[in-house]
Image: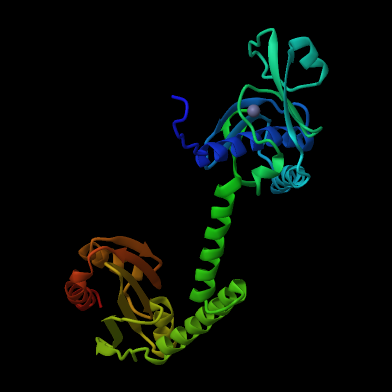
Amino acid sequence: SVGDEVEAVVDKSRAEVEKHHSATHLLHAGLREVLGAHIAQAGSLNDDKRLRFDFSHPQAMSAEEIAKVEAWVNEKISRAIQAKTDVMSIEEAKKTGAMALFGEKYGDEVRVVSMGDASVELCGGTHVNNVSQIGLFMITKESGVSAGVRRIEAICGNAAIEAVKTLRDELNEVKAEVKNVNPLVGIAKLKEQIKTLKTEVATAQTATKKELTPTMLKEVNVIVEEVDTGDIKTLIDEAKNKYPNVAIMLFQKKGDKVMIACGSKETPIKAGDWIKQIAPILGGGGGGRPDFAQAGGKDASKIPEATQKALAYLEENL
Ligand SMILES: [Zn+2]
């Protein structure tokens, strides 16, 4: 009743919805400005934290086009254009050049929302009084919806401020993690360190490389062993260069799997035949030439058995 106290509360989220909705008007106009007059709205959704605008366009927007549209909208915002709503007949509205939705039914009287000469559109929604209220406008994503329809997602107002704050916080975390005020310099330094460490590891592996010593079997230098480090193909080449009459098979664990390689030089053993007998023990297969063959296996626990069988094969075939 008269005299009662009432409390009027401005719904902040309502104001944020108005900002996103009003930004959609500018975005629509900006897209037509940058991409051409063929741009027509195919769908629009906005709330207090984001806006989504679907429109007809035959291909994905380039990064440059996206930047141009974003800059166009922000330039209009910075000009603090007053928004104006007029009710007029549809004929009068057409004369103003207002953008209307194709195929949409309008009554005799329509609402024309204009933001200076930046945007004139038929719309029944609620808007900001002045485009400067929209604040910062940021396009967050451009994607395809269906053939010939693209989608832009964007933020403005408080949502844009929050997004920038998040970016700043994340960047500060990155700076702290890479221990450099310039994160790119920090990352470049880390990459350089990784490169150095890789070289050091490779050097260390070569230095600790096991000396492969052959045993004599029927005047053939025999090496059948599991090796932890070093490239087994290289080790086989080295043994073949170092010794005459050599039959060599090496196993190396790679995680759960096993790499197998073997070589034969100046012996009756054919490497390809030899490995075909041994690889299945390790749950694998492979083959190769008489002088060199390789295979992969799946069961590293069978390496001792494979070693025994490889030696037995030589006993029989040498
Ligand atoms: Zn509107």
Q: Using the rendered image of the protein, determine whether residue 149 is visible from the camera's viewpoint.
A: no
What x and y, as percent, mark residue 196?
Answer: 52, 84
User: Seen from this angle, which residue lies furthest top?
Assistant: 108
Q: Identify the residue at horizontal 69%, vertical 25% (top origin).
A: 40
Q: Identify the residue at horizontal 27%, vertical 61% (top origin).
A: 284
Q: What is the quadrant of residue 76 in the picture?
A: top right
What x and y, as percent, mark residue 221?
Answer: 31, 87
Q: How many marks?
A: 0
Closest to the observer: 55 or 229?
Answer: 55
Q: What is the quadrant of residue 273 in the picture?
A: bottom left
Q: Quadrant of the C terminus?
A: bottom left
Q: Is residue 168 above or below residue 99?
A: below
Q: Is residue 165 above or below residue 179?
A: above
Closest to the observer: 107 or 274?
Answer: 107
Q: Identify the residue at horizontal 55%, vertical 54% (top origin).
A: 163
Q: Is residue 202 above or below residue 32?
A: below
Closest to the observer: 265 or 148?
Answer: 148
Q: On the rendering, which quadrant does ligand 1 occupy?
A: top right
